[in-house]
Image (cartoon, rainbow, N blue to C red):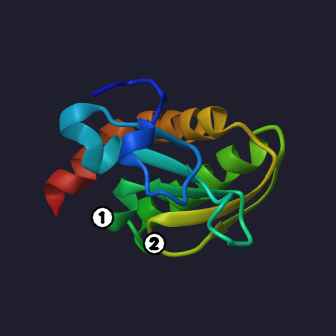
Amino acid sequence: MSEEARRTDPDELDEEITEGWERLPGEENYLRGVEVDSGEGLGEPFDWLVTIWAREYFRDDPMGRELKQRLESAMLAVPGVTSAENASWETWYVTGKASGEVLCQACANVLDGLADRMRAAYDEM
């Protein structure tokens, strides 16, 4: 498990996905885990599918709204990103010719910045 974004092993990807990145910090994957998969080859209208595991726990509450806003701002700040649409609670459709690694790290930085508050809120659930 790693604190840095790393390229997903091609053997772990579905055959349609051509590139994947992840940040999996071990025991805190549920709060700080990020997955970024290429939409190329899926026939979808997005370039990247971003999954943020913490959004399973933080949705429409104040922490969830802040997390969503910060993640979207971080994604849109990545060079080459033209849009970031929250497709479901945990996933975003991101368009634009951006680096999957940079996109993954940008999301990881947001999660790291909110980690202490998310841990405390999670423990109160």
Dot 2 corresponds to which residue? 89
How far across and how far down the image is residue 12, in percent?
Answer: 36, 45
Judge from the rendering whether residue 24 lies leftward or rightward of residue 42; answer left or right.
left
**Which residue: 65% across, 61% down?**
41
Instruction: Determine contact: label 2, label 1, CB under 8 Å.
Output: no
Residue 114 or residue 72, whichever sits in front: 72
Residue in the picture at 30% in, 64% down = 57
Report the amino acid beneath label 1.
Tyr
Report helix, strand or loop for mark 1. loop
Camera-side residue: 44 or 86?
Answer: 44
Q: How many marks?
A: 2
Nearest the viewer among 104 and 116 is: 104
In the picture, which quadrant includes the C terminus? bottom left
Q: Position of residue 123 (x, y in %)?
A: 15, 52
Q: Earlier in the sequence, mark 2 or mark 1?
A: 1
Q: Nearer the viewer, mark 2 or mark 1?
A: 2
Q: Which mark is residue 57?
A: 1
Residue at 84% x, 43% y is 80
Question: Residue 117 lies in what quarter of the image?
Answer: top left
Q: Is residue 97 left or right of residue 86?
A: right
Residue 26 visible within the image: yes
Left or right of residue 7, residue 44 in this image: right
Callout 2 secondary element: loop
- Badge 2 crowding class, 10 Å Cα cut-off, few under 14, some 14 to 19, many 20 or more, is some
| Quarter of the image where one finds residue 119 | top left
